[in-house]
Image (tube, rainbow, N blue to C red):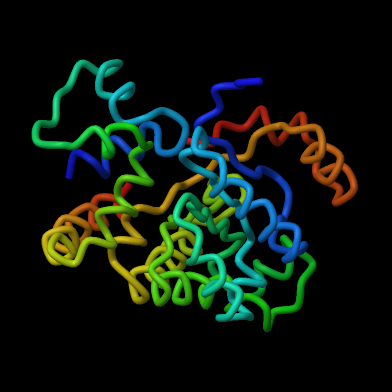
Amino acid sequence: MLIFQLAEIEGEDANLSDLMDRLGITITGLSSNALNVPPRIFIAKLMRNNCLKEKLIKVAKEFLKFKLNS
Amino acid sequence: MNFRIKKFGSHRVEPSIGRDHLIQLLEEIERRSEIELFILETNGILFGSSKNYVKEISHYRKVHVRVSLKAGEPNAFTLRTGAIKEAFQLPFNAISNLLKYDVSFHVAAMTDPRIMPSEERRMLIERLAKIDLVVAANLEEEVCDPYETTIVRMHVYGVDPVKFFKMKAY
């Protein structure tokens, strides 16, 4: 869920690593490739990973509820 | 010369119109090892009308497409773009084509409440969710900025830009 929230703050310009530094947060287990792209592009990469797609859909459903009520 | 440019993009233009030129540009980007990412912004009209075009784009691994939606229903689409209502579906077809050919992309929409009513925003998000839930959740929602061209177009359409930008977006 955090990655969708980060994308709402800054989706396209700042890299994930810069954004996390700025906000003082840490997400463990991410490769340097993932950290070097903006959050929305990172989500687009996750979407194309078939192993993660199911989990991502679950999170997306939750996030959409929040988005539609905001 | 080394400009140390790692990513760049096309903004406020429609690069898909010049298909041959765009393909040449993508070829050049692929060749240049220092460039890691190219963000291709599009209204999705041509990518929605030609699956082959999207298939061709899918061969380039550094490209990330940003599809910019203008409206959540056909009448608003015509009002804002001047295009025929029948073209409203094309950007949504582009999204399906990008999914089909496994192109990296996300969707943006001008959901600024000064321009788009909340019901239309809901329709747009629900329409996206029917295509793909993750694409809908990853929707980039934009607010209207006072670019020079925006101000000129507002004036032409009888909207007072000073009054408009004095209103709060959220």
Relative to B4, say whether B20 is above or below: below
Q: Residue at x 60, y 21 (%)?
A: B2
Relative to A41, say whether A23 is above or below: above
Classify residue A39 as left or right of residue B2. Answer: left
Q: Residue at x 76, y 71 (%)?
A: B83
Picture coordinates of residue A47, whole percent (x, y): 27, 60
Q: Which image quadrant for residue B166?
A: top right
Q: Which residue is drawn at 38% across and 46% down?
A: A41
Picture coordinates of residue B60, whole percent (x, y): 50, 59
Classify residue B75 as left or right of residue A34. Answer: right
> Which residue in the rendered view is the most extreme toward the bottom?
B86
Q: Residue at x 16, y 37 (%)?
A: A30
Classify residue B36 as left or right of residue A7. Answer: right
Figure quadrant of the N terminus of chain B:
top right
User: Camera-side residue: B147 or A33?
Assistant: A33
Relative to B14, say whether B97 is above or below: below
Picture coordinates of residue A60, whole percent (x, y): 22, 57
Classify residue B34 as left or right of residue A60. Answer: right
Picture coordinates of residue A16, whole percent (x, y): 31, 31
> Which residue in the rendered view is the most extreme toward the right?
B156
